[in-house]
Amino acid sequence: MNFVIIGAGSAGLRAAETLREHDPQASITLISGEPGEPYSRMAIPYILTGAIDEAGARQRRSHHFLEELGITYIHGKALHVHAGPDGGQVELEDGTRLDYDRLLVATGSSPTLPPLPGTDLPGVVTCWTLEDARQIAAKLVPGARVVMLGAGFVAGVCMKSLVGSGARLSVVAGRSGQILRSMMTPVGSQMLQRWLEGRGVDVITTGRSLRIEPGPRLVMDTRGIDADLIILATGVHSNVSFLEGTGAEIRSGVVIDAHMRTTVPHIYAAGDVAQGRDFSTGEWVVHALQPTATEHGRFAALNMLGQDVPYRGSLSMNVLDTVGLISHTFGLWQGLEGGDNTEVVDVANFIYTRLCFDGDQLIGAITIGHSNHVGAIRGLIQSHRHLGEWKARLMANPQLVMDAFVELNQGS
């Protein structure tokens, strides 16, 4: 069997290892769109702080682990996939063509640039690749003026490194006027914003960005901001252009079924590029999360090998360190129409807990400022545990969630 994997991130690498584990004789080719060894994007903030060097970002310690597994590792950008009823070919940008019997698309995502003039000017970067990290690190000196366009998850991941460097950071939240809107209620966002402002971050929640001028300089309709570095963190999009013409169904990402198969025979997808099943809703969504990517890669590989291993869906879960304040979101943290929600807010101590219920089942949660309930919350959501009388107790005091988890799991 000839397996080809496009993408050497968490999903692609885990798939390659799983394929080799279960089929010692198969031909496995792993294609990376970036030079160098497979690395973790989640390590980039630690490179910026100097906590690790670039070698520390490698996904596996050994320089030769792919060679030792008999996996062919090449660099190149996928230009097109030629799909047939029994397999096909991957065409790379340099003209190389690779035959496959089974193909895994694990190409992840790329930054979405804001629709502004000047995003290609010197001193304007994204925060996504090792090359981006090099450019940012070169500018991060105490007192450096850094402007970040965007205040979502990608921005949140980078903020701690920027503030820790001694840079003067301004964060432009955009039209929503709310930071971390995609993973936080207004109550939680306001708490995180107050925390950032207390650490010297200028959080800009009003005004519209118009353009970027040489300098670089961000021009808004309310002000102009001179900078040494402007970081674009306005979201990401799935890397799917090379699948045009194959017949693969593409929405927010490549649509897959419960066996990680696309709508094209013998082509599978995993990770940030895949629009797969959501554990909480059963709907098909893109979960750009490293644990989900790793799970996707393993399940995709098993099904590519001919095993019947359905994936029950990924739990939406974000963990964020916002300049030292830890937050978690789980599942349907917005709640359901007609469902019950409860919150406890300790403004002075930056502590917030929100629990959301469907009947007597916990379906979503947010925590800020403490992490001792995280395992219990995840366990209760993923087990679909009926809370019984514990629901009323949690509605009255969400901080009892660990007690509920322990008692409900005794003897089970």
Image (tube, rainbow, N blue to C red):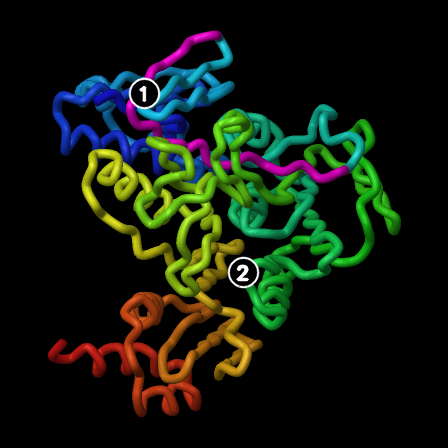
Residue neighbourhood size for the residue with mark 2, other residues' Cα within 10 Å, grouped as few (<14), some (14–19), many (≥20): many
Which residue is depicted at the point 51% across and 74% down? 335
Q: Which residues are magenta?
A: 95-115
Select label 1 or label 2 by which is in front.
1
Q: Does the magenta portion include 254?
A: no
Task: State whether residue 6 is above or below residue 258.
Answer: above
The reply, left or right, for residue 404 in relation to residue 105 is left
The Cα–Cα distance between marks 1 and 2, rounded to whole angstroms, is 39 Å
* Tag shown at residue 290: none
The amino acid type found where label 2 is placed reads Met
Task: State whether residue 205 is above or below residue 164.
Answer: below
Q: Is residue 46 visible?
A: no
Q: Which residue is mark 2?
A: 183
The amino acid type found where label 1 is placed reads Tyr
Q: Secondary structure at mark 1?
A: strand
* Tag shown at residue 100: 1
